[in-house]
Amino acid sequence: MRRRFSEVSGFVLAGGASRRMGVDKATLVLGHETLIGRELRLLRSICRFVAVIGPVSKFSGLDVPVFADEVPGRGPLGGIYTGLRRTRTEFNLFMSCDLPFMESRLLGFLCDRALETEADVTLAQSSDKRLQPLCAVYRRRALTAVRTTLDSGDGKVSRFFSRVHCDVVPWKELNRAGFLPRTFGNMNTREEYEAARSAFGSARWSGQA
């Protein structure tokens, strides 16, 4: 049975404009569910508290709390700030709303890792060696550093990382654990959405929900 973490809250970051897609990515359908519905299902499987950060009017029909972005227009870091302000737990798992191939097993892996370290942020490295800050565990104590970064006028998550202690899980370790390179694949264009739809309908896709 998959472990649930009472000490970790889960948040979907759904405040983006989806300009390149042309429609709200969160409401796109993959398989039998919307993308945001899928991500909420994954988070619910491991977190006792789950919420969405985004426009309340857009997501009020969901059966989870929805928190309006307290610093709109500042990108994902503003959403992370909102979540850390609202949370009641020290550990908080944030996901952007455009990760169609994410697995609950990887989310649990990151939560386990975060609980074992003293890091402010626990995040993964993808197969192309890039850091993945929008599927990561943030401790509530990082709130001050997030606020400082936002107040500096620079909303880049990478700038925030220079102010905190990060534990990066290298791709080699994730690959040894059986995760696929496409696990962190996101969708920004209609072509990428169509590719994801095709993958979900193909027997070649072997990821586990």
Image: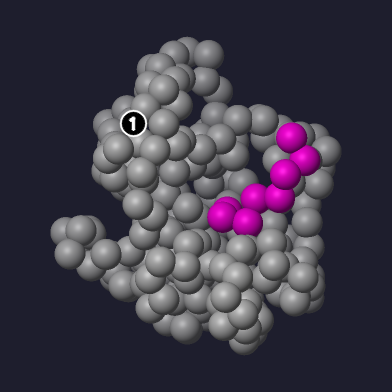
Which x, y percent locates residue 54?
Answer: 33, 64
Image quadrant where residue 11 sits:
bottom left
User: Would residue 93 appear left or right of 38 to someone viewing this image?
Assistant: right
Closer-to-camera residue (120/155) = 155
Describe the element under mark 1 as helix, strand or loop. Answer: strand
Which x, y percent locates residue 104?
Answer: 53, 46
Which x, y percent locates residue 187?
Answer: 46, 35
Residue linked to disc 1? 30
Farthest top residue?
203
Closer-to-camera residue (104/145) = 145
> Would you say residue 139 is visible in this rendering?
yes
Vertical placement of residue 46 versus 103, above or below: below
User: Would residue 127 appear left or right of 153 to someone viewing this image?
Assistant: right
> Would you say residue 34 is visible in this rendering?
no
Magenta-tinted stretch: 128-135
In this picture the colour scheme is one colour
Vertical placement of residue 167 versus 103, above or below: below
User: Would residue 162 appear left or right of 54 to someone viewing this image?
Assistant: right
**Residue plotted at (57% across, 68% down):** 155
- Main secondary structure found in the magenta portion: strand
Q: Is residue 171 magenta?
A: no
**Residue plotted at (78% across, 56% down):** 168
User: Would residue 102 appear left or right of 69 to someone viewing this image?
Assistant: right
Closer-to-camera residue (3/80) = 80
**Residue plotted at (57% across, 54% down):** 135
**Residue plotted at (54% across, 51% down):** 2
Which x, y percent locates residue 113?
Answer: 73, 61
**Amino acid found under the numbered disc labelled 1:** Leu
Farthest front residue?
153
Image quadrant where residue 119 sits:
bottom right
Crowd rating for badge 1 (residues with CA inside 10 Å; few <14, some 14–19, many 20+): many
Count of numbered circles on the image: 1
